[in-house]
Image: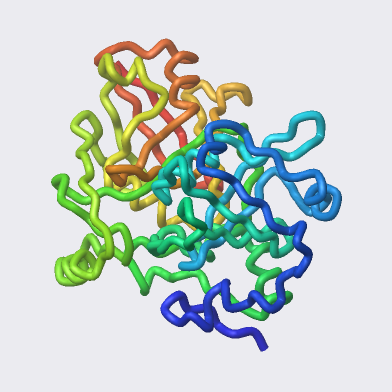
């Protein structure tokens, strides 16, 4: 019987399954810190032995059970780790030029990730609550870990946190490579925990989570956006929004999105949806000196498609009738 995973118990974390991992030396992929500015190719021997198991996305899990969905680009049939995903890892782990990532292939598109300094000393990694394995990996990968590695991950429920997942149907097929980048907000620009659950409703729980956090970051407010109720927000168009490819989301709307379990790929439909005016997004953590949610990538395509102007406003609403779909209305 599989053990129940627990990231507070070293014997119930992903790294505890190491005795069941492949022993082949070709399953190791090292990425120097100075090579994360471009797509990174898998070594030829790795591709020869494991390339058939790779798909458009692979998943990396570190020693604190943080997990990452990694986009692969294919050049002439050869898989590369995309520079987009490498940049996300760089920000998440604060990777410097003389540091390096070591990836050990486990199977079924899963890698174990370690971080080293210039002297090959392994570096400490901090846990991030929203990057916990069951919050990131799709069901087939969780099933593989349970059946082959004898470790069962249980998705946190709403009783564990006010931002727990809501059960919905399986992943939709809505993605065209854009990004819907996310992290956390706190009301009023207060500092928030970079680990641990933040209970927006219960002040005592919120305070405890902040006090127990390992790291803190300052977050910014969204002055031109307004939350209108569950799954709805509007944002007023100003000049800076027309010069950028992403917009920040209100904390409440970000929390609503985090409640939804399943695919991290979404579709945003324009007001005159006719099968063409759809904009794909992908859920990825955006981390740096601030910790916040952003609507990225396809925002640029959207505002160009509709010729948005200053003083207009857009209303985004999670579609209650279709999985992982948002509708957008344009007014003014």
Residue at the far right in the pictured view: 48
Q: Is residue 248 left or right of residue 41?
A: left
Front in this rendered view, residue 186 or 59: 59
Front in this rendered view, residue 222 or 128: 128
User: Is residue 173 visible from the viewing direction of this image?
Assistant: yes
Q: Is residue 244 above or below residue 207?
A: above
Residue 305 lies, in percent from the top left, at: 49, 15
Q: Is residue 76 left or right of residue 252?
A: right
Residue at the far front in the pictured view: 119
Q: Is residue 272 above or below residue 257?
A: above
Front in this rendered view, residue 69 or 261: 69
Residue at the far bottom in the pictured view: 1
Q: Quadrant of the N terminus?
A: bottom right
Residue located 53% across and 53% down the image: 68
Residue 295 lies, in percent from the top left, at: 41, 34
Residue located 63% across and 47% down the image: 172
Q: Quadrant of the C terminus?
A: top left
Residue 196 lies, in percent from the top left, at: 32, 66
């Amino acid at each position: 019987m599989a053990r129940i995973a627990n990231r507070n118990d070293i014997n119930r974390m992903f790294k505890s399954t190491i005795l069941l991992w492949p022993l082949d030396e070709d399953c190791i992929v090292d990425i120097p810190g100075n090579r994360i500015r471009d797509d990174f190719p898998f070594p030829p021997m790795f591709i020869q032995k494991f390339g058939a198991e790779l798909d458009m996305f692979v998943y990396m899990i570190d020693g604190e059970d943080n997990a990452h969905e990694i986009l692969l680009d294919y050049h002439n049939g050869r898989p590369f780790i995309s520079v987009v995903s490498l940049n996300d890892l760089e920000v998440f782990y604060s990777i410097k030029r003389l540091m390096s990532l070591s990836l050990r292939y486990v199977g079924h598109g899963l890698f174990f990730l370690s971080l080293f300094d210039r002297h090959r000393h392994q570096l400490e990694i901090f846990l991030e609550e929203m990057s916990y394995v069951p919050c990131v990996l799709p069901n087939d990968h969780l099933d593989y870990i349970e059946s082959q590695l004898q470790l069962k991950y249980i998705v946190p429920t709403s009783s564990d946190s006010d931002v727990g997942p809501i059960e919905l149907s399986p992943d939709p097929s809505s993605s065209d490579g854009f990004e819907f980048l996310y992290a956390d907000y706190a009301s009023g620009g207060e500092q928030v925990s970079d680990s641990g659950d933040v209970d927006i409703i219960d002040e005592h729980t919120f305070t405890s989570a902040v006090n127990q956090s390992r790291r803190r970051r300052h977050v910014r407010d969204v002055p031109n956006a307004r939350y209108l109720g569950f799954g709805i927000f509007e944002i007023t168009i100003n000049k800076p929004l027309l010069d950028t490819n992403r917009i920040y989301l209100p904390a409440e709307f970000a929390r609503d999105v985090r409640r939804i379990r399943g695919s991290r790929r979404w579709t945003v439909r324009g007001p005159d949806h006719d099968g063409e005016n759809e904009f794909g997004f992908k859920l990825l953590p955006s981390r740096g000196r601030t910790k916040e949610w952003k609507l990225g990538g396809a925002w640029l395509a959207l505002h160009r498609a509709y010729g948005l102007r200053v003083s207009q406003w857009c209303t985004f609403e999670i579609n209650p009738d279709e999985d992982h779909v948002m509708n957008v209305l344009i007014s003014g």
